[in-house]
């Protein structure tokens, strides 16, 4: 089992709270690669596995005046042949397609239960007078191409909560290197297209919210890019630790918002997982 790709919205520190950023920690620790998993128990016909972990997650939002936030977060994972739960990420697995000995297509219905993004007016003096922007549940479909060179993943997501009424398309690429039987490095790159509704909801300023130094702003669709490097060390079949460093480069339609004063967002995560 491969670790899930980490794409732009999963890096995004949430000004409301950092639980939404824990998606990154959950995906990378709770969805650990095969070498860090305990082999399925012979008495479990579905090959199920589950784990618990803790992570220290530190993220910097792009919203103006919002300080870096660091929290310790719990994580839970469960997986069998039909479903995978990785923290707030839920996937219903669909039948895949084996193309060759080294290539396979995987399909799934996915949901991000605590999608990043959003803020409250109290998060920063620059946001005073702004209406709250809520985090959403994002749901959609994914296809993943596993091959010897790199794993490629495409996700099509919509705002199932109806907060932004937006849509996102995520394309990611990752490569796994085993440096030793216990140590794996995983560099990742990705791009994410977000539509006008998404940008306008999370980064727009309505006429009623405009004031001196904060003009009205209507956003359009844009593309974010991201890069990360993860390292996972396995002590034994039960215990593993991971360090992840990630940066998201925001599209122009987000950078130009009057409530944004950074062109990037970043995240650092150190975590521990116990595989049962």
Image (tube, grey):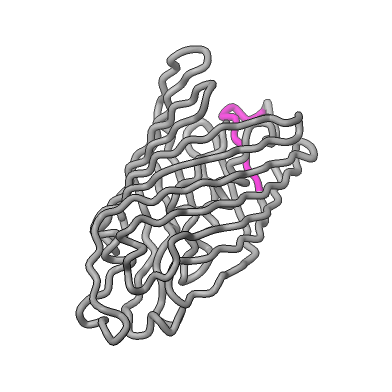
Number of callouts? 0
Q: Residue 109's x, y, as percent?
A: 37, 39
Counting from the top left corner in percent of width and height, residue 159 is at 31, 55
Residue located at (57% from left, 70% from top)? 69
Which quarter of the rendered picture does the N terminus lie within?
A: top right
Q: Which secondary structure is most common in the magenta stretch?
A: loop
In the image, residue 53 lies in the stretch drawn in magenta: no
70 vs 94: above or below: below
Specify the quadrant of the image occupied by residue 165.
bottom left
Pick whichever, 204 or 113, lies toward us. Answer: 204
The x, y position of residue 225, in whole percent, is 42, 48
Is 26 on the left or on the right of 180, as rendered? left
Q: Quadrant of the C terminus?
A: top right
Q: Nearer the viewer, residue 253 or 19?
A: 253
Outermost residue toward the top in this view: 100
Of 63 and 164, nearer the camera is 63
Q: Whole-percent x and y of residue 20?
A: 49, 61
First to last magenta residue range: 43-51
Residue 151 to residue 275: above or below: above
Residue at the image position 52 percent from the left and 23 percent from the top: 149
- In the figure, is residue 112 to the left or right of 193? right
Whether residue 44 is in magenta: the answer is: yes
Q: Work out which residue is located at the far left of the displayed protein and give it.
A: 207
Residue at image x 48%, y 18%? 103
176 sits to left or right of 88:
right
């Amino acid at each position: 089992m491969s670790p899930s790709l980490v794409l732009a919205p999963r890096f995004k520190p949430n000004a409301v709270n950092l639980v939404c950023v824990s998606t990154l920690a959950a995906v990378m620790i709770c969805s650990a690669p095969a070498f860090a998993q305990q082999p399925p128990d012979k008495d479990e016909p579905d090959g199920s596995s589950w784990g618990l972990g803790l992570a220290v997650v530190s993220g910097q939002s792009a919203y103006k005046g919002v300080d870096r936030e660091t929290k310790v977060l719990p994580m839970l994972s469960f997986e069998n042949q039909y479903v995978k739960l990785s923290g707030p990420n839920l996937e219903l697995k669909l039948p895949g397609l084996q193309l060759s000995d080294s290539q396979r297509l995987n399909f799934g219905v996915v949901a991000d239960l605590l999608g990043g993004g959003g803020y409250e007016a109290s998060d920063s003096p620059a946001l005073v007078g702004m209406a709250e922007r809520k985090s959403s549940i994002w749901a959609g479909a994914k296809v993943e191409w596993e091959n010897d060179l790199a794993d490629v993943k495409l996700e099509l997501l919509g705002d199932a909560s109806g907060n932004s009424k937006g849509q996102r398309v995520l394309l990611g690429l990752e490569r796994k290197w085993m440096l030793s039987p216990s140590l794996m490095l995983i560099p990742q790159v990705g791009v994410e297209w977000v539509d006008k509704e998404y940008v306008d909801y999370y980064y727009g300023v309505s006429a009623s919210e405009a004031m001196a130094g904060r003009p009205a702003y209507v956003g359009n669709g844009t593309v974010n890019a991201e890069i990360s490097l993860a390292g996972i060390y396995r002590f034994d079949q039960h215990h593993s630790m991971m360090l992840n460093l990630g940066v998201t480069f925001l599209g122009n339609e987000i950078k130009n918002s009057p409530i944004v004063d950074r062109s990037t967002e970043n995240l650092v995560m150190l975590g521990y997982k116990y595989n049962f």
